[in-house]
Image (cartoon, helix red, strand yellow):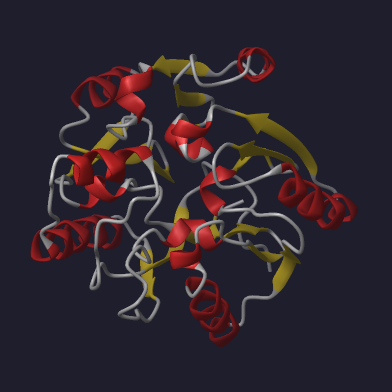
Amino acid sequence: MGYVSNSTGVLKKVMMARPENVRLQPINVISDRWIARGGKIDAAACLREHAELVETYEENGVEVHFAPTRKDLTNQVFARDFGACVAEGYVLGRFREPIRFGETGVYEAELKKLGVPCAAKCRDGVFEGGDFWFLDNKTLAVGTVARTDAKGFASLEKQLKPLGYRMIRVPCPKDNLHLDMCFNIAAERVAVVCRDALPDFFLKMLKERKFELIDVAQEEVFQHHCNIQCIGAGRVVSFRSNREVNAKLRALGLTVLDVELHEILKMGGGPHCMTFPLLRDP
């Protein structure tokens, strides 16, 4: 059985975690800014926003499986980050921030229950799923930003190369947190990018692959303007305040499903961060 072999096929099944224990933590530029301003987070609003995102997925044929939550795991809502999924099974990452360490066991146990095999495991350094993208079914772009390092990249490359994968390391300035905050594939050969955050060789590679690029400014990265979720068949999940990007996506003929997200964004993640893909059409 093939699980996930691309970034744009029709999304069939995902794993998510409800934001039942959210708290602002000083672990990224976005949450740091809110904390510095004395900002609070409205847990009830987070639950409402997350429920709307889940409803949007389900209305569009995406099955949502919920991982169990724990009171000490304040950032577990960002289910993407514990690892990644390839055709052969899941890739188990290693978190950089200690407050997220406990998430690994929760998701690992849940995938075992679901019968999803482990295809690779980060054994050295750190790797988080927000840095992981398919450029095609055997080419993987992996960001080394704030949460994935060269050792983590090398550890996974050693295990995934024998499976036929080519891995490309994409270094970006650390303030961008994850690659999916400054680069996101919205549809086949359509990407939202912050050119100031991405290396020239990677932008050239996207151009050679004939990607249509939608630009966002560096400051817009911290407003999650790149952080959207492709669900295939010309559909992409975004959020309502991402107006300019949404308009450009629609101008390209894509269907934009924009949910109301504000409160969860304070924690430093958007729709893509909250969504761990389990099954996509090849």
Residue 96 position within the rendered picture, expressed as x and y whole percent measured from the top left: 56, 56
* In this picture, residue 163 sits left or right of residue 247: right
Q: Answer above or below: position of 49 versus 13.
A: above
Residue extending farthest right:
162
Quadrant in which the N terminus appears: bottom right
Say which of 51 and 154 sits in front.
154
Q: Answer above or below: position of 89 versus 183.
A: below
Say which of 80 and 123 sits in front.
123
* In this picture, residue 16 sits left or right of residue 248: right
* In this picture, residue 243 sits left or right of residue 183: left
Name the residue at 48% across, 14% down.
196
Residue extending farthest bottom:
113
Name the residue at 53% across, 62% down.
82
Residue 181 position within the rendered picture, expressed as x and y whole percent measured from the top left: 43, 35
Name the residue at 84% across, 58% down.
159
Q: Can residue 253 be seen in this view?
A: no
Residue 46 position within the rendered picture, expressed as x and y whole percent measured from the top left: 16, 60
Q: Quadrant of residue 149?
A: top right
